[in-house]
Image (spheres, grey):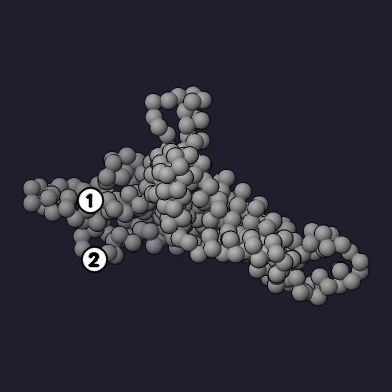
Amino acid sequence: MKRIAYLAEKLFSALLVVFCIVTVNFFLVRFMPGDVVMHIVGEDEYLNIMSTNPEKIEEIRAAYGLDADFFTQFVRYLKKTAALDFGSSFRTKAPVLDTILFRGKWTLYLALPTIVISGLIGGFTGLLCGWGEEKWYDRLVTRVFLLVNTIPSNCLAILFLIAFAFRLKWFPIGGITSGGLSGWARTADIFRHIQLPLIVLILYRTASNHMLMRSTVTQLHGEQYIDTALSKGLTERLVRSRHLLKNALSPYITSLCMQMGGVFAGSMMVEVVFSWKGMGSLIYESVNAKDFPMLQGCFLLIGVCVVAFNLLSDVLYAVIDPRVKDGEHEKV
């Protein structure tokens, strides 16, 4: 019952945070200095309309529901958000939701393999190096991953692009596909284009996951229950799998879930470098074009994903560790 109460409390907190995100998203544009219509259509377009056809400003204001009072606007916004109606992009005129779903698909092709592969490799190497701290393989692997972890992802992407695509010509320079292909030929071409950005993201995420797992294992290695288990004659492999890993997984899974929550924005700079038309590049393009309807939809999606996967981490935390009581982790 205590675990159910814990999960119910987490669910209520998540719904409250989502409501706050929706509220902030509503007021974000409206509280910016200047006319709200100017932020929606862009300053240049706004000045052009004001000089040629000022009446159109009021038409735009009515189209976006800005002619009503704040409370009425907020209620309308909540109803549209609940119906997944985020309006249309002022830059492309396409529905925001359709664009996000299309571009988000390509980001998932990058993000899901990255999180799974980097989570497994980073967790394994971190566990191994944290247990065998200061051994030769720990010094080698940790120093390599520490170097990778200190390089910004966009710089790492540019280095790989220059070395392996431009110089060695092992991979395409950028884009999703060469175009003009269909069937298995198109699938194979997409696979060629995805390899280099995927390698960069996996390497970057693995370095971060390794450092987290190694730090956690190093801290737990000296705990009393580990020494007690070893003194009973249990092998190191058995102690690592039965006692150490169980406690180390909780913060590690939380980190992986948070990575999933930020999946649509986390690879933005890598997508821009490799011209990968996913959510990251969509946000980048929308910021440059000041496409606020699109940005509002993207930010709302990212916020909801972060909250949802944070809730998932709490659920997994309670499933993995039965000592979770009333939202607290009691170590025994």
Q: Is residue 129 left or right of residue 34?
A: right
Q: Position of residue 278 (x, y in %)?
A: 42, 44
Secondary structure category for the residue under label 2: loop
Q: Position of residue 73 (x, y in %)?
A: 32, 56
Residue drawn 57% across the image and 64% down it: 146
Residue drawn 42% across the image and 34% down it: 177
Note whether residue 203 is visible: yes
Count residues near mark 1 (Cα–Cα under 10 Å), then give few for <14, some for 14-19, many for 20+: many
Question: Is 182 in front, or is 46?
Answer: 182
Count residues near mark 2 (Cα–Cα under 10 Å), then give few for <14, some for 14-19, many for 20+: few
- Up the image or down, 241 lies above or below 64; here it is below
Amino acid on which the number 2 mark rests in the picture: Pro
* Residue at far left of view: 52
Which label was assigned to residue 31?
A: none
Secondary structure category for the residue under label 1: helix
Amino acid on which the number 1 mark rests in the picture: Val
Q: Position of residue 15 (x, y in %)?
A: 53, 59
Q: Which residue is mark 2?
A: 33
Place residue 176 in its image quadrant: top left
Which label was assigned to residue 41?
A: 1
Q: Is residue 148 left or right of residue 312?
A: left
Note whether residue 80 is visible: no
Task: Look at the numbered discs 1 and 2 and tell me whether their residues touch, using CB distance below 8 Å.
Answer: no
**Residue at mark 1 to residue at mark 2: CA–CA distance:** 15 Å
The first of marks 1 and 2 along the sequence is 2
Q: Is residue 92 left or right of residue 239?
A: left
